[in-house]
Amino acid sequence: MKPFNIFKTAVVFVFFLSISACDEPSKKPADKPVDTNISYKQISPVFNADSAYNWVQKQVDFGPRFCNSSGHTACGNYLVDEFKRFADEVIEQKAVVKNFDGKNLNIKNIIASFNPTAAKRVLISAHWDSRPYADQDPNPENHNKPILAADDAASGVAVMLEMARQMKAVRPEIGIDFICFDAEDLGKSNAGNDTYCLGSQYWSKNKHKPGYKADYGILLDMVGAFNAHFIWEGYSVEYAEPILRKVWDQAIQLGFSNNFYYYKGGSITDDHYYVNTLAGIPTIDIIHYSENTETRFAPHWHTLGDNMSVIDRNTLKAVGQTLMEVVYKEGK
């Protein structure tokens, strides 16, 4: 994904020190939830963070997973097989797209569905490819080396796999579509925003089923690191603010206020941008935000440091349990 658009002026966070803010009129707190009831009773199955952690590890074990690589092929087949263990239907959407340098990329979007005929649907997505160059690594000698991408974004795929495992045992009453988007992380900022997110661009123009619709979507990107902070990303506010409030309110009710913050941040070109603008499905982005880096991403973003050492079960739990509760409540 392309870095956040950064504000030129400095403001003070409710929970952070003074930082530079994004290219929007001003950065300000979003309204906080009315009810943060500590006696809240969960209705969804328990999200197993150990299981999700193991699925991050399984993906990382394939090594770098960028398009046209052997690790990409092997991991893609593995993910298809795993989702087939749980979901009612799994579709492999294969295509050939061009990278910014003119090379053909063999991509595969993986769609795993529960209750595929249900009219009411929620789309949950993450990208499953890894970046082939660690161009943000502090050591310039590493800039052309591929990364393991434990957080960006094996963590999001792992959350979806654990959700699917739970849904196999306790079925949701609505339709759920998990989409692993391919070719998200091969772009170059100086080559244009649209060089990122090639898999979601392709899917948004060529949905896996004619006339496919979902009530809303939730994108997971970098959702597994220690002490991850999630704020309201700009395009999510623009296209799907009610969904942001729904998810953040749920997180607070479940006790995950250390991860989910009611603060409006900058906009980022990520898979949700194209699901919003091309597919017309209001979609939010849950993505790690850092006040301590120039890019506003976690320090390990696009570096060789994005490995299993940054993954935290507590963060996986916070995100996974929140989404479980959101989708199971939709069926009530």
Image (spheres, rainbow, N blue to C red):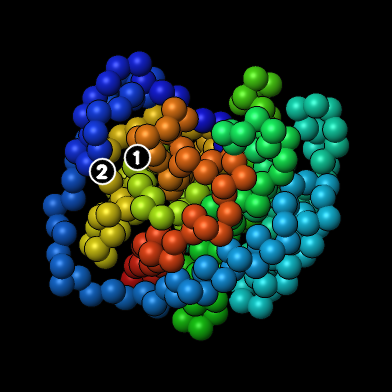
- Quadrant where the C terminus sits is bottom left
Give the side of residue 48 with respect to residue 39, left or right: right
Query: First in sequence: mark 2 or mark 1?
Result: 1
Disc 1 packing (10 Å; few <14; some 14–19; many ≥20): many
Q: Which residue corresponds to mark 1?
A: 232
Query: Where residue 99 appears, x then y in whole percent?
Result: 78, 32
Separation (CA) of disc 2 from disc 1: 7 Å
- Mark 1 belongs to which amino acid? Trp
Q: Tell me which residue sits at (62%, 45%) in the image.
A: 304
- Contact between marks 2 and 1 (CB within 8 A): the answer is yes
Looking at the picture, tell me which residue is in the foreground, 214 or 45: 45
197 and 305: which is toward the camera:
305
x 14%, y 57%: residue: 35
Quadrant position of the N terminus in the picture: top right
> Across the whole image, how many numbered discs are drawn on residues?
2
In the image, residue 46 sits, relative to residue 323, either above or below, namely below
Left-right relation of 82 to 243: right
Report x, y in % for residue 274: 58, 36
- Examine the rendered structure and indicate whether residue 28 appears above or below residue 302: above
**Which label sits on residue 262?**
2
